[in-house]
Image (cartoon, grey):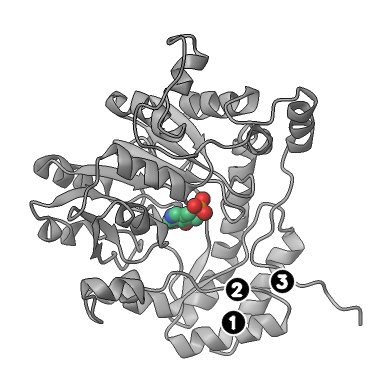
Amino acid sequence: MTPVPPISFNRSSLQGRELEYIFQTISAGQIAGDQTFSKKCHALLEDVLGVQKALVTTSCTHALEMAAILLDIQDGDEVIVPSFTFVSTPNAFVMRGARPVFCDVRPDTLNLDESKLEALITPRTKAIVPVHYAGVACEMDEILRIGAKHGVAVVEDNAHGLFGKYRGRWLGTLGCMATQSFHETKNITCGEGGALLINDSRFCERAEIIREKGTNRARFFRGQVDKYSWVDIGSSYVMSDVLAAFLYGQLEVWRQIQEKRRVIWGCYHQHLSEWCAQHDIRQPLVPAHCDQAYHMYYLLLPSLEVRTALIQHLKARGILAVFHYLPLHLSEYALRWGGRRGDCPVTENVSERLLRLPLFNSITEEQQHEVVEGVRSFAV
Ligand SMILES: *Cc1c(COP(=O)(O)O)cnc(C)c1O
């Protein structure tokens, strides 16, 4: 028997004219930031989503750091984040001196539980940072209502949700700002990269300055000032145009990419539904008012033991399935804020039971069916 090549959990691939565009940037001798392809990425995101301003950055983490600076986060401020997220969601604010306040997630969508949000607000709360987990929208009407009522900014960590919608509105356009990731593991990628989306024009000019090391270089390039100088704090958050060229090659075919992922997601969902129902395994839940971004396919298994066994079973068949976030409130670093088991029971529970199946733009139909067969041949 010829050995079947393993199916990785994620694998990036060319989706369009990435290489041609990279060659163009290099041939033009313009590989620093904010050249032709960065501008094309900005224009595409602004046009499609209808945001005031889009700025590509070195990562989503850096876009979150920019948001924290723009909101003037200071020592002692509090920022509410879901406990079930990536470390950067709170860390970008913690770097400015904030204390993270962890909110539990809803058992259905695994998104920040808006019914538990208001109780966590104090006079020190400066921001709420919901994450659209797996690309399925949070209950933004309620989160925005609570934010507005208490004068607290809402920043969407939209790393999973680009081109998803909530009640017909694009994710990333609902908070005063939103952050995107173009890391290799995301739907659309350039290896490492991100973007800050700005929906409140008050932040536009300062965002350009913070992104350019605290200088007004962007205004200088537009001829609005005759020299540029140091005007604020900031850092080096500008993406190289080589990466922006790769990114634009993917962004311009975003519809095809999302369509491919919709089909893959649908294949898993359909072909695993009977098996899941028989074994009391929960499939992802997408509310009718959410157009999801097809970032991820996960299963919620009955227990940690079953999940561990299924990971092993799939691994033996050459399929890499992986778990996801560990509860942040119980992480080594967060214990300084007194996190305890039981603070976010849903996060603690799902974190042990969730398994993500391979989902990437170039996974073949045959591989998808191998994954389905791999799961269905597991004796729960
Ligand atoms: C991937 C991810 C990030 C970080 O993205 P980078 O571009 O790697 O900095 C932040 N938040 C969430 C929810 C993510 O999934």
Residue 291 in the image: above or below residue 53: below
Contact between labelled residues 1 and 2, with CB atoms less than 8 Å apart? yes
Instruction: Let me know if residue 171 appears in the view.
Output: no
Instruction: Let me know if residue 269 appears in the view.
Output: yes
SS of the residue under disc 1:
helix
Which residue lies at the image location 65% right of the left edge and 73% below the top edge? 320
Q: Which residue is mark 1?
A: 311
**Closest to the observer, 270 or 293:** 293
User: Does label 3 or label 1 sit earlier along the sequence?
Assistant: 1
Q: Which mark is residue 344?
A: none
SS of the residue under disc 3:
helix
Could you tell me residue 256's position as x and y percent?
64, 39
Q: Which mark is residue 370?
A: 3
Q: Amino acid at mark 2?
A: Ala
Q: Quadrant of the N terminus?
A: bottom right
Could you tell me residue 283's position as x and y percent?
46, 68
Q: Is mark 2 within 8 Å of ligand 1?
A: no
Could you tell me residue 271's position as x and y percent?
60, 67
Q: Is mark 1 within 8 Å of ligand 1?
A: no
Which image quarter: residue 319?
bottom right
In the picture, measured across the screen, residue 233 lies left or right of residue 301, that is: left
Residues at marks 3 and 2, CA–CA distance in whole angstroms: 12 Å
Residue 173 in the image: above or below residue 223: below
Could you tell me residue 127's position as x and y percent?
23, 48
Residues at marks 3 and 1, CA–CA distance in whole angstroms: 14 Å
Contact between labelled residues 2 and 3, with CB atoms less than 8 Å apart? no
Which image quarter: residue 304?
bottom left
Q: Residues within 10 Å of mark 3 (few under 14, many from 20)?
A: some
Q: Which residue is mark 2?
A: 321
